[in-house]
Image (tube, rainbow, N blue to C red):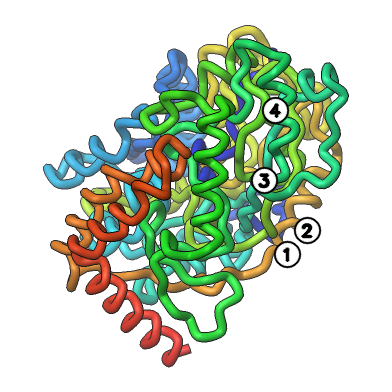
Amino acid sequence: MGKKKKGFMPIAALILAVSLIVSACGNSESNESNNGGEEPVELIWYTIGTPQKDVNRVMEEVSAYTKEKIGVTVQMNMIDWGDYTQKLQVMTASGEPMDIMFTSSWAFDYVQNARKGAFLEIGELLDSHGQGIKETLDPAFLEGSKVDGKNYGIPANKELPAQEVWRFNQGLLDKHGLSLDGIYSLESLEPLLQTIKENEPGVTPLAVDKTYKPYVPYDFIIENMPFAVSLDTTDYKVVNVLEMPEMQQALATMHKYYKAGYVPTEASTLDSLTDLQTTGKWFADKATTQPFADNLWSQSYGYPVVSTPQSESLIYNWSVMGSMQAISANSEHPEKAMEFLNLLNTDPVLRNMVDSGIEGVHYKVTGDNRMENLEESKNYDMPTFSLGNVMLTYLNPSDPDNKWEEFKSFNQNGTEAPLLGFNFDPTAVTAELAAVSNVKEEYWAALLTGTVNPDEHLPKAIEKFKAAGLDKVMAEIQRQIDEWKAAQ
């Protein structure tokens, strides 16, 4: 089986993108040799993902290369998906030495931590040491990831819009002669799920975990909170999405599916779908796509996966900020950190080493810009999307030659969501948001996965949200959106 090249963030959505395909040469500044004989600077880099056995081995090779190029060595510390946010919060609060860290809209919250002072403001550094990044990235990335008018992180050059899809285990589609014609809405899945339920004991017809959120045509102000604006809004009115007909219909359908046994019994507390994906005992699920995503998923799981859209392709704040690298406000070497990030985002040799490991050990090059994993790749299986410019990475055996051109086209054709560029400042309603968040913990996953009956539990949830201060938070969000609109 090929290396699990995780091209997406798990959840959100995952998860996250550009218009410009970069040339294969790093910029000339990066190619200057090491610091005129000075001792190299060690950069400490924290990144997200299941810790890999060969990280230190690969970083020795990376360091030999970067020492020669820009006079730095690199120590990478990987922290597992579920622990990343909490551990980074503790480490930044305690002033732990670090230079570069992964941040995003969904892990170690980029906007929140930029405002808290965890990251260095990098406008001038981008001009002085990051010209290659500015030439490479679609301007929408740097513009869309500004916080209060300033840049604090470098988005990964990858897919810019987000498009929700239904994914299917192709073997089961073929076995039962099922077609994806007419599949788009949640309701359209019903006959297929019923066929699987009746004929495939032991297979989960619709695989959802506690992070599942039915697609509804709204732009959420805070991910997984009920505040939203309709995608076709003209007045930018903030609503409680749980009171909207589209969401209420989705909750009713999910509960119907839950009662029919299409959804895992423990969906509302299930941490991930990895076990189902490993065994192939699932039929359909929801994901966020990118060009040729089916190839990536199929290679990752070791069996064919196909997908079909369930939404338009939209550029949201969270997709622009789906994967970023920031320089720590405590970094002792901010210029060298930016030089390294510039090299990482413009130099294919470095980018592929960080992504795929050591040539001849973890992978072999099979042609111009192409690679194939070797057995040892199981000890160095990195989440590609989280490590910088995705468009510099080698193509896998199943990738078409025009993969990066298709990414470029996908990015250019995305539609901007109404709140792109708006970042809510929660300072004035911190207490109310905390109370609303507690209510969310109690009801959100249970309602969205269909585990509980919305006829009975939705009115209770809405009442509790209001008692917690939801209306006050909505009023503050509305005030900030109105101000933001007026300033545009």
- Neighbor class of circle 2 (other Cα within 10 Å; few <14, some 14-19, many 20+) is some
Tag 3: amino acid: Glu
Q: Look at the numbered disc 4 and give the secondary structure of its residue.
A: helix
Q: Which residue is mark 3?
A: 187
Q: Sequence order check: which comes first, mark 1 or mark 4?
A: 4
Identify which amino acid the numbered label 2 is placed on.
Answer: Ser
Question: Crowding at label 4, few (<14), some or many (≥20) Cα neighbours within 10 Å?
Answer: some
Q: Secondary structure at mark 3?
A: helix
Label 2 and label 3: CA atoms lie apart by 30 Å
Which residue carries the number 4 mark? 194
Which residue: 51% across, 16% down? 275
| Sequence-first disc among 2 and 3 | 3
Q: Nearer the viewer, mark 2 or mark 4?
A: 4
Marks 3 and 4 sit apart, C-alpha to C-alpha, by 12 Å
Looking at the rendering, which quadrant does residue 291 occupy? top right
The crowding category of the residue bearing disc 1, from other C-alpha atoms within 10 Å (few below 14, some 14 to 19, many at least 20), is: some
